[in-house]
Image (tube, rainbow, N blue to C red):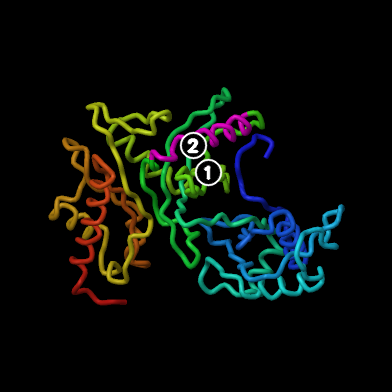
Amino acid sequence: MEESVPHPVGRENIGSKEQLVDAIVQLRAMKPSLKQVMVKLNEGVSGEGNAVIDLTGLPAVAGIDDAGHPGVSTLPGSPIPATTEIAMLGERLRSMQFESPGVTYESYMKKLQERQGVVEERIIGKEFRSPSVQLRITPLGKVELLSTHDQLLGGPSGQSYLGCLFPADTAYAGLITQEAAKVGRRLAKEGVIGRFALDFVVVRAKNGTWEPYAIEINLRKGGTTHPFLTLQFLTDGTYDPETGIFTAPNGQQKFFVASDHVESPRYRTLTPDDLFDIVVRHNLHFNQTRQTGVVFHMMSALGELGRTGLTAVGNSHDDAKATYDRAVAVLDEETRGGASL
């Protein structure tokens, strides 16, 4: 807010049902058009601590008083009393949608009490994407813009990180880079050093432009870090933050699709040696002459989880996607006759 970076309205330090309901009442009074809010546990990873609360269909809000507590409405229409709104919100909490499978209302509220969390507006739109920006602050306080990505998300409400596309769409890569730079300069003033990532959502406005909203700062290396470093090490190329383009020394632009969730129960029949053999036989490996191909990681998870990860490098977004799809299709075909465990 202090750096004028667009972001969802929200409240932090939420540690109980009462605090959560009170915060949602305040948010509805601030923004009556709210359709959904997101609850995020502190110390959540890859969206696993997230839950969505649906607010559609609720009557007009009751408003808040000067102290920020539920009070008498000053809004037009026929609002419901504050006590009724609180009761209705309590019911909505019990039907919230959890990102992690197997989570119950009781277990989630217990974790909220233990860890605390935040509740914020969920930005929604007909055309909606989730890009991110990687940055680094040097020991001298210089802010370096490293890369942009479009995140691949899944899960019940689309909040679980599955992978990424590089680079982010040029239609909004510059927009999110500008906003991320503001945050980077502020963090540098606060003494932050090292890599971090800033997650955004972007929504297409009626006039066709993209509107960016910063939603999360991850003060660490994240899921987009290792595939980008893989691309750098393999090609010795450079990223231009102004154009959002990564170029190899030979002048060829480079793109990739990466995922940590290439998985199937049938993959449990594979060992890392089996995977190496498949890669060689089908010519999937990264070719240093062409500087395209596939690099696998997380291979130790094959036997137990039937999961591996890969980064598919190409000379265009379509090329990288085709390489990724071919690698997955080969794995599926090679394990088609295997036992499903």
Q: Nearer the viewer, residue 206 or 148?
A: 206
* Picture layout, residue 277 above or below residue 183: below
Label 2 element class: helix
Please give left or right for residue 215 compared with residue 73 in the image. left
Quadrant of res 273: bottom left
Position of residue 20 measured from the top left corner of the image (x, y, whole percent): 72, 63
Quarter residue 25 falls in: bottom right
Q: Where are the magenta residues, as a range?
A: 170-188
Q: Give the residue at mark 1.
A: 212
On residue 175, the disc is 2
Left or right of 45 on screen, residue 309: left
Q: Nearer the viewer, residue 167 or 49?
A: 167
Amino acid tagged 1: Pro
Residue 146 on image: x %, y %: 44, 33
Q: Which mark is residue 142?
A: none
In the image, residue 1 sits, relative to residue 31, either above or below, namely above
Q: Main secondary structure of the magenta part?
A: helix
**Side (left or right) of 39 relative to 128:** right
Badge 2 vs badge 1, beta-carbon distance below 8 Å: yes
Determine the secondary structure under disc 1: strand
- The residue under the point 33% across, 35% down is 232
Q: Earlier in the sequence, mark 2 or mark 1?
A: 2
Which residue lies at the image location 27% right of the left edge and 30% below the top edge?
248
Drawn side of residue 61 relative to residue 126, left or right: right
Q: Position of residue 11 (x, y in %)?
A: 71, 53
Query: Residue 121 placed where, x, y %?
Result: 63, 56
Residue sitting at x 61%, y 71%: 96
**Magenta stretch: residue 262 in it?**
no
Toward the viewer: 281 or 28?
A: 28
